[in-house]
Amino acid sequence: MRRIEIAVMGAAAAAASFFMAWHPSGVADYAHDAGPTLSPLIHGNIAAALGHQPAMGWFSILLRAPFDFFARHGSTLLEYRVGSLPCVLVLAALGVWLAVEMRERRNAPWLACITVVGLAVLGPMNWHALSAGHPEELLGAALCVAAVLAAASGRSPLTAGLLLGVALATKQWAILAAGPALLVAPRGRAQIAAIGIGVAAALTFIPVLAGSHHLLSPASTVSRSTTTAQPASIWWPLGHVDIIRPYGWPIERRVLPVWVANISHPLIVGVGILLPLILLARTRRYAISRESALTLLALLFILRCLLDPMTIGYYNLPLLIALLALEALHRRGLPLLSLVSNLVLWYLVVHVPWGLEPGKVAAIYLAWALPLTLYLAAKLYAPSVINGLGKWLSTSLPSSLTTTRSSMRTPNAPGT
């Protein structure tokens, strides 16, 4: 019966992946980002492909190329859709694996399993990333979570290192997964680190050295600091108000001091190093638990969004996938935090015009992101606070509700 369930979930996830990949009606950033590299590559023009350095890492290019080969005589839109499919499928595979673990380890109800698969494949920020021309965001998020899970299992440091390496060779922000992956590994940390660095370096520098770029070209593809702040950022309230009229009507934007813009990205990397070290010193164990590693990963990803002045909707995708994995594997019932987070971001992206109502975006985003950040941080570094809050809530419930919950947990007769 379980094999039938897995087959059904896998088929549903695959069908949803095809639907997602074929959804975009335009190529957006793909036209000037991955397209100038991928299109020549599938037509056999290696020199032209190597002559353009894409903003993302080369792994997503190499993963998409065999699929796009069959669409090489079609339109750019067809090429983009076909190339997006493997990125969505990787995330779908992770979602199915999480659902299977829920079903087999904790006998989770079907509704919870279907919700996890649905959020993994059809989450609103997945749509946003694909519509913006960035399927590699889905791929990078899945690989980061998979690297942490593989390291936590302790079965194969080689697999964990490979997953971490290809994640690093997909998106630069994947460096935030290195700390959780290394801390959770019960053995083979040096092997994981060496393989991860080796794979990432090979996939990054070999195309650079083979092409017409200088050695520091990968560094030049990292998003440069900007003095303009998006409202989904902790810096936005600190910016200077500037009114522009690009379309004939006034639009408010916030301009940051140059020094703030310059430290934002190094600060994100610094947090990615400092927080794992603090956790390691606090726990005083060789390896942290899988739950702690996923919590740390989600915390680092939400801090990345808060600290990046240019955060937009799909930047939160890695956070959502890490949060989904945390709840799927270590919470009973529906993944409520993931559901609420997806709903908040869906509302902000679909129903609020960021250029016309930035104050509303900032208020809603920070009202969601800051409490979530505090919760994740307290869960890691002050678990007694979370435990005390849980006990206070349980003792503060009405007696009738407490009695009902107790009767639901306790069977009427042994073995029933």
Image: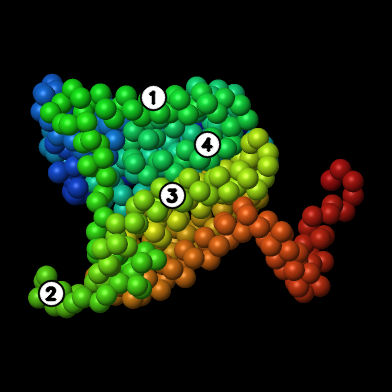
> Taking the image as drawn, is residue 412 in sight?
yes
Q: Secondary structure at mark 2?
A: loop
Foreground disc of the pair 3, 1: 3
- Mark pair 4, 3: CA separation: 17 Å
Residue beneath the point at 51% across and 23% down: 191
Cα–Cα span, label 2 and label 4: 46 Å
Residue 379: image quadrant is bottom right
Within 10 Å of disc 1 (Cα), the crowding (few <14, some 14-19, many 20+) is some
Displayed quadrant of residue 34: top left
Q: Amino acid at mark 2?
A: Arg
Q: Secondary structure at mark 4?
A: helix
Q: Name the kind of residue labelled 3 in the image.
A: Gly
Q: Residue at x 22, y 31 (%)?
A: 215
Name the residue carrying label 3: 270
Answer with mark 1 or mark 4, whichever residue precedes in sequence. Answer: 4
Q: Are marks 2 and 4 in contact (CB under 8 Å)?
A: no
Q: Which numbered disc, 3 or 1, marks the residue that appears first in the sequence?
A: 1
